[in-house]
Amino acid sequence: MRVLLSVFLLSDAWAAGPGAAGPGAAGPGAAEPPAQKPRIAVVLDDFGLTYKKNVPDDKWMALKWPATFAVMPSSPLTKSAAKAALASGHELIIHFPFDPFLRLELPKDRVSPADLDKVTKLWQKCLSDIPGAVGVNNHRSEKATRNRPLMEAFMGLVKAQGMYFVDSWVSPKSVAKDEAAKAGLKTGRGTVFIDEAKRHDKAFCVRMLRRAATHARKHGWAIAIGHHYFQGTYDCLAEEAPKLQAEGFEFVPASAVVR
């Protein structure tokens, strides 16, 4: 299965991040609140899907810092992966695939009944097979996330469950985060991908994770997205996360950085 991934950095336009103090947050003479550590949320996609050289899921579940596990629907391993992720104490979200998985029509000015039916049925299956999920991010879906009518309709489904939405930002023209915000969801956008289909060695992951840390140092937060398949990604996170913690960074679930 081909994984199309690109590295995107967030624009400074959405840079304040959670926890930013507003005007008048502390009056004269008030004690200064402790400075919040820069936060990094690591989202690991595609749990429930397997490839030949997968890192065993139990190694991910044993991570000593909070991570977010995104589980794919409609896989023979979906239910078991979701159950294990929930039992691990890490955050569980739905990794929702639009195109090319659902073969959508995607008219520009409306949502076709056929598209809405496909999306709604898969969403209902997600809720049944991935209980305990608190958020959603998109799997691929380069075309769907650019389609405003579909994103508006989908965010209504997500809002009804009280979940948050992370735009994986596989397309720079994505409107998914914008529509999530309009719907009143807590939302965010991926800062970097720490691995790719053709670049998943440890050195690449370290470089991208450090790029996420630079963003977090500047803006207070970053969302780093990777995949559970790759040994290089696991080795990178196992080694670099403690180093970054020692440097003053905090690893948090994605729910801690969406707003």
Image (cartoon, rainbow, N blue to C red):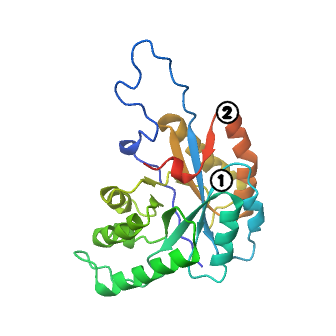
Q: State the residue at coordinates (73%, 42%).
A: 242
x%, y% of residue 219?
47, 37
Q: State the residue at coordinates (39%, 64%).
A: 159
Q: State the residue at coordinates (62%, 40%).
A: 250
Q: Is residue 228 above or below residue 72?
A: above
Of the image marks 1 and 2, the number of the one nearer the N terminus: 1
Number of numbered markers = 2
Drawn side of residue 10 relative to residue 114, left or right: right
Q: Quote the CA–CA distance across marks 1 and 2.
A: 18 Å
Of 195 and 166, the residue lying toward us: 166
Q: Under tag 1, what secondary structure?
A: helix
Q: Under tag 2, what secondary structure?
A: loop
Kindly identify which numbered label has been placed on residue 205: 1
Q: Label 2 is placed on what type of residue?
A: Glu
Of 36 and 9, the residue lying toward us: 36
Q: Quarter holding the N terminus?
A: bottom right
x%, y% of residue 256?
53, 47
x%, y% of residue 39?
56, 41
- The residue tagged 2 is 247
Q: Label 1 is placed on what type of residue?
A: Cys
> Mark 1, mark 2: which one is toward the viewer?
2
